[in-house]
Image (tube, rainbow, N blue to C red):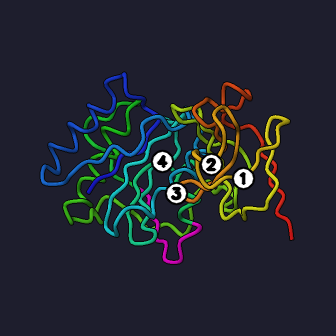
Amino acid sequence: MIVLFTDFGSRDPYVGQVKARLTELAPAQPVIDLLHEAPDFNPHAGAHLLAAFAGGFPPGAVFLAVVDPGVGTPRDAVVVLAGGRWFVGPDNGLLSVLAARAKDTQIWRVVWRPETLSATFHGRDLFAPIAAAIARGEFPADKLSPLDKLAVEFDPGDLARVIYVDHYGNAWTGVRSVPANARVSAAGVAFKHSDSFGFVGRGEGFWFMNSVGLLELAVNRGNAAEKHGLKVGDPVDVQRLN
């Protein structure tokens, strides 16, 4: 299984081009479109999203992860094995949160370069061939060099900011394991707790722990981001009470 996590969007040709390369190189492997609307140019937010999603996939899954504003620069390409799952992508912090949270992390730098390598599309030309080889069960040891640590490492603790806004306008945060009696506010607004949408009135705001274990701000049958002006990067205040 190859899992795609990118900021490529769904209206441009980039996802299709990557999938074409993967299908060519690993035709027996299913390719899962996890997310192509990760926050643009934001490896920090992407790192917390990817770490939250990873546990929902079986050991052996290969993630091709691309949020890469530094593509074409000297930043390294890396392979990370964490929690029994493989991750291929740029060494810009995107893979650092999941790597730090796992107990059994191994890291390699990709030293191989293909004969044809676009300066702006490493997802297709560099990451995809490596991910395909791993998914086929053919670890490309000759193309990799072991690393002790990643070059860019974000704090693996909770991130008390909005890290994603979905198409409903729900604002996901990088905060985990919040008790129901916590006080949560953002954009100058206090949000009450609810377990789900149907327990609050229509148009009413609330916070809940979402399906991947992250604190999320929402409005029942409404758009929390529009109503409260929430956007990726906005701080969220979480006060855990005794």
Of callouts 4 and 2, the N-terminal one: 4
Instruction: Residue type at mark 1: give it.
Output: His
Mark nearer the viewer, 4 or 2: 2
Instruction: Residue type at mark 2: give it.
Output: Phe
Instruction: Residue type at mark 3: give it.
Output: Val
Q: Which residue is mark 1?
A: 193
Whether residue 101 appears in magenta in the rendering, the answer is yes
Q: Which residue is mark 4?
A: 90
Q: Which residue is mark 2?
A: 199
Numbered tag placed on residue 9 in the rendering: none
Of callouts 4 and 3, the N-terminal one: 4
Q: Camera-side residue: 103 or 143?
A: 103
| Number of numbered discs overlaid on the protein picture | 4
Secondary structure found at label 3: loop
Location of residue 87 by image quarter:
bottom left
Instruction: Residue type at mark 4: give it.
Output: Pro
Q: Which residue is mark 3?
A: 212
197 lies above or below 119: below
Of callouts 3 and 2, the N-terminal one: 2
Q: Residues within 10 Å of mark 2 (few under 14, many from 20)?
A: few
Identify which residue is drawn at 84% across, 58% down.
Answer: 239
CA gap between label 4 and label 1 equals 37 Å
31 lies above or below 227: below
Identify which residue is drawn at 13% across, 54% down.
Answer: 28
**On the rendered structure, is 97 left or right of 14?**
right
Tell me which segment is drawn in magenta. Answer: 100-109
